[in-house]
Image (cartoon, helix red, strand yellow):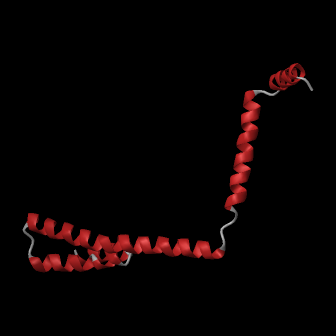
Amino acid sequence: MGQQSFDAFTRQAAAEISRRRSLAALGGAGAALAAGLAGPLGADARKSAAKKAKKKIRKKCKKQVGQCKTFIQNLCEEQNTEPEECEDVLECCEFLGQCNTTAFLQCLVAVQ
């Protein structure tokens, strides 16, 4: 195959295949390759991810106790509320440390 016939062949091939079609084919091949490389997650990987997620949640819940107590103490100081009344509400914040928002709200209702 000579240089001129090769050039004619490449020009003809380029004219028949559109840029959009070739990019779509490359994109599809890349997605298939990525899916094949990733593969399905094993049970151990899922368990590990679940443990990490639970640990993050517990950490956030524990932070809420301090935030709740600070908020209530500041609120009591602003409203000049008696310390005994605030202590009852402060005890409700402990439920947030266990990620139990329902019990926290029930405690607040019971205190009032």
Q: Where is 22 relative to 97, above or below?
A: above
Q: In this view, does 71 lie to the left or right of 28?
A: left
User: What quarter of the picture does the C terminus occupy?
Assistant: bottom left
User: What quarter of the picture does the N terminus occupy?
Assistant: top right
- In the rendered image, residue 53, in percent from the top left (x then y), is placed at 48, 70
Residue 11 in which image quadrant: top right
Residue 55 in which image quadrant: bottom left
Residue 41 in which image quadrant: bottom right
Taking the view exactly as shown, the residue that stands out farthest to the right is 1
- The mark total stands at 0
Q: Residue at x 48, y 72 (%)?
A: 52
Closer-to-camera residue (22/111): 22
Q: Is residue 15 left or right of residue 61?
A: right
- In the rendered image, residue 83, in percent from the top left (x then y), is placed at 10, 77
Closer-to-camera residue (107/71): 71
Q: In this view, does 56 lie to the left or right of 4?
A: left
Q: Residue at x 33, y 77 (%)?
A: 97
Q: Which residue is drawn at 25% across and 70% down?
A: 68
Q: Is residue 30 left or right of residue 44?
A: right
Answer whether residue 51 is visible to the viewer in this image.
Answer: yes
- In the rendered image, residue 64, in percent from the top left (x then y), is placed at 30, 70
Q: Where is 91 relative to 64, above or below?
A: below
- In the rendered image, residue 66, in percent from the top left (x then y), is placed at 25, 72
Answer whether residue 110 is visible to the viewer in this image.
Answer: no
Taking the view exactly as shown, the residue that stands out farthest to the front is 2
